[in-house]
Image (tube, rainbow, N blue to C red):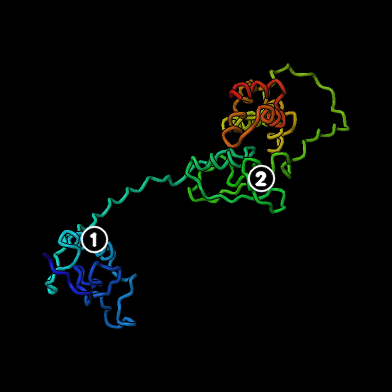
Amino acid sequence: MTQQAAAGWYKQPDGSQRYWDGDKWTEHTSPGVSQQATAGEPGGKRPWWKMKRFIIPAAVFLAFVGLAAAAAQGEGPSSDLGSSPTPSATPSPSPSPSPSPSETPETFTMPIVAGMTLQAAQDSLQALGSYVMDQEDASGDGRLQINDSNWKVCTQIPASGEEVPIDTIVVLASVKNDESCPGAAAPETTAPAETTAPAKTTAPAETTAPSMTVSQEQAVRTAKQYLEYTAFSRTGLIDQLEYEGFSTGDSTFAVDQLGTDWNAQAAAMAQQYLDYSGFSRSGLIDQLVYEGFTQAQAEYGVNAVGL
């Protein structure tokens, strides 16, 4: 029969001491000599945060090993107080492989985000790797954009088409969806007719007039670029071109030149709204009508997304 040891402090495998109450191990421990602080440490003890990371888990592991061994031998330490069990070696954790750095593009081409919801604009930029943005209230009131889906972008810096470094700060100025962007260009006015009538000359042979003026060509080009990035109603796209500075005539001409399927645009915009927020059927129809779609186009778009 194993002799129960007397109550007292006993050396542990990790160099510390633990108190045996004569019947079982207690939770009371005392640092051993190997745990004393280096010269100059206040109090003569090494602070716990300066101990090597593997000492604590190793000590806990060895303490459990010691308890298990004691339980197997009679719930007490051996009467031979001068010896202590030799702990099994604790494997040192192998270093985890360092992840290979992902390739990050150095530049990106600034897309057209003016006219998008602020949320859609952010998603378009982040898809290109651009995450550095400054959001501003275009009205000048300094309001915070809490729900980005409820705001639309009025202006963007840098301008679309520019190749810029990936860490460029993109400035997006926006207003709420039911507000008009400030600073829209005034419509062009017709130049006054000359007062002096020119002398009559023999009229030259008529030549075929060009199909589009330079301004109309640019309006068509800009309208196509907008439709490449997001959905628009006919009136919404005309308003956006007017905001860009085109006359109402050129804006209307350009939009009608595209031959756009406005039912398809209504369906695309309905899906964009459902991607960012919840809507009832009637609520989504009303939202599409607000965006400039006809009632029939709005209902078509909502039906197309299955709502």
Residue 136 numbered tag: none
Which amino acid is tagged 2?
Ser
Q: Which residue is mark 2?
A: 174
Using residue 195 as the reference point, say whether residue 60 is left or right of it. left
Closer to viewer: mark 2 or mark 1: 1
Q: Earlier in the sequence, mark 2 or mark 1?
A: 1
Please identify the residue farthest to the top as the structure is shown.
205
Q: CA distance from mark 2 to mark 1?
A: 63 Å
Please identify the residue farthest to the front as the structure is shown.
1
Q: Which residue is mark 1?
A: 64
Using residue 305 as the reference point, say whether residue 188 is left or right of it. right
Label 1 secondary element: helix
Residue 52 in view (yes/no) = yes
Q: Contact (CB < 8 A) between labels 2 and 1?
A: no
Expressed as whole percent of the image width and height from the top left, the position of residue 116 reads: 62, 37
Residue 150, placed above or below residue 49: above
Which amino acid is tagged 1?
Phe
- Which of the image's four quarters has the C terminus? top right
Q: Residue at x 30, y 78 (%)?
A: 45
